[in-house]
Amino acid sequence: GVATQDYLFVTFQLLFAATACTIVSGCVCERISFYAYLGYAFLLTSFVYPVISHWVWSGDGWLNGFPASPGQPSRLFGQGAIDFAGCSVVHMVGGFSGLIGCAVIGPRHGRFDSEGNPIPMPGHSAALTALGAFLLWFGWLGFNPGSALVAATEVSDPVVLSDGSIAYVQPHLGIARASLNTILAAGSGGLTALLIVRIRDRINDLTACLNGMLAGLVSITSGCAFVEVYAAIVIAMIGSAIYLGTSKLELMLKLDDPLEAWPIHGAVGMWGIFAEGLFSRELHQAEAGFLIRSWGAFYGGGGRLLAAEVITILVVIGFVSAIMGPFFLILKAVGLLRISADAELLGNDFEGHGGFAYPEDVIETVEAEETVKELPPNFLNRTIMIDSRKDSASKINHEDV
């Protein structure tokens, strides 16, 4: 059983596992079946996430970067990997699981034309999208600083740094640093995406700005407690650019990722843990209680930490692929992965759940109202939406020519 004093930690980890699970839904939404959703959610949260989180965060894990206690395994390269708040454990697990599901399930109907060109399918509410993004930003202020787990400890033994100076374990300093770095990374990532898209497409794209903000947050998740303020800004800017580049790559590969979840969480998650191996400061690792046999390569810490981070990236991708790949393929083979084309056109809210997620458009004429009565509920609204997307795409292509 779980001791009462561990209930809070279990709750914290439960929410992290749920976060990894929700990332997958962004890659496969609008066409995955409810049964497939329940299946992957169970597998991811009961097996994939617990195994990887144990490897990276448990004292008994072989990738762990804390000093080993008696009976615990020696650390990878004598240092172990450091992932403070889950770039690998949460974001890469969810992002790469979603990428595999996205590739296996295939694109939504109407997402690409006959020549393979993407057809825009924008969200129904920019206001709600912005609200959701800012709620995530707010939640990250619990996600990152909260990963310290404690705010105060008993006076620790002194830790001698490479320059002969003395440091002590002081979690509250890591919490303060993680808080500021998280806020700055979000703003830097959003502004970077806004600027790049403005230069590239000559528009001020709200969605790109919001996703760039999330990319900045993911970028700093691994190293938020260990890097300097200026490094947090640089890491977030690069992460935002990686998000934009990999989202284009997905379209080139005909991968339909409605919420761009893999670019934001999977690809940028890789960058986040890699950046930890470049920018981490020896003093800050010591203050958080981690090993200091190696630290950021840019600060003379050697390459052992960076090598451990790279191994972690490869291990996460390999383990997730080995578990989630066969799972999605088996569901596809037995016909349980995807809803029918009719259900997708009508809307899974109506077809699968007997209700409507969004209000119906107002029909202005009596004749139109009578026509609608003869059609399946929600059919006309969805059909008009699809046709308008195709017309918009054709207009854009014509104007470009």
Image: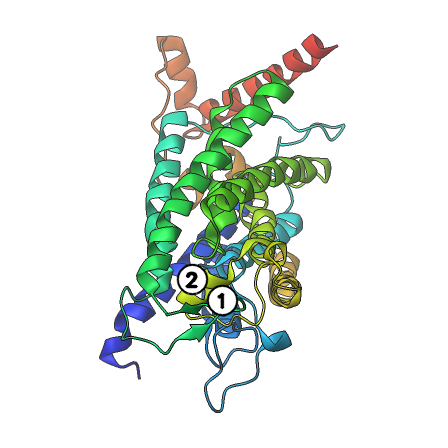
Do callouts 2 and 1 mark residues in contact (Cβ within 8 Å)? Answer: yes
- The image shows residue 210, relative to residue 198, as above or below, that is below
Q: Is residue 356 visible?
A: no
Looking at the picture, tell me which residue is in the foreground, 345 or 228: 228
Percent of width and height locating residue 231: 52, 45
Q: Give the Cα distance between marks 2 and 1.
A: 6 Å
Percent of width and height locating residue 361: 37, 20
Instruction: Say what amino acid the circle numbered 2 marks.
Output: Ala
Residue at horizontal 48 percent and vertical 57 percent from the top: 35
- The image shows residue 337, relative to residue 248, as above or below, that is below
Instruction: Quadrant for residue 372, please give it.
Output: top left
Q: Is residue 124 visible?
A: yes
Percent of width and height locating residue 278: 60, 55
Point out the residue furthest to the bottom here.
71
Looking at the picture, tell me which residue is in the foreground, 399 or 287: 287
Mark 2 is surrounded, within 10 Å at the Cα level, by few (under 14), some (14 to 19) or many (20 or more) other residues, namely many
- The image shows residue 69, relative to residue 397, as above or below, that is below
Q: Which residue is mark 2?
A: 17
Point out the residue furthest to the left here.
4
Looking at the picture, tell me which residue is in the foreground, 150 or 85: 150
Q: Which residue is mark 1?
A: 49
Give whichever of discs 2 and 1 has the lower sequence position: 2
Q: Mark number for residue 302?
A: none
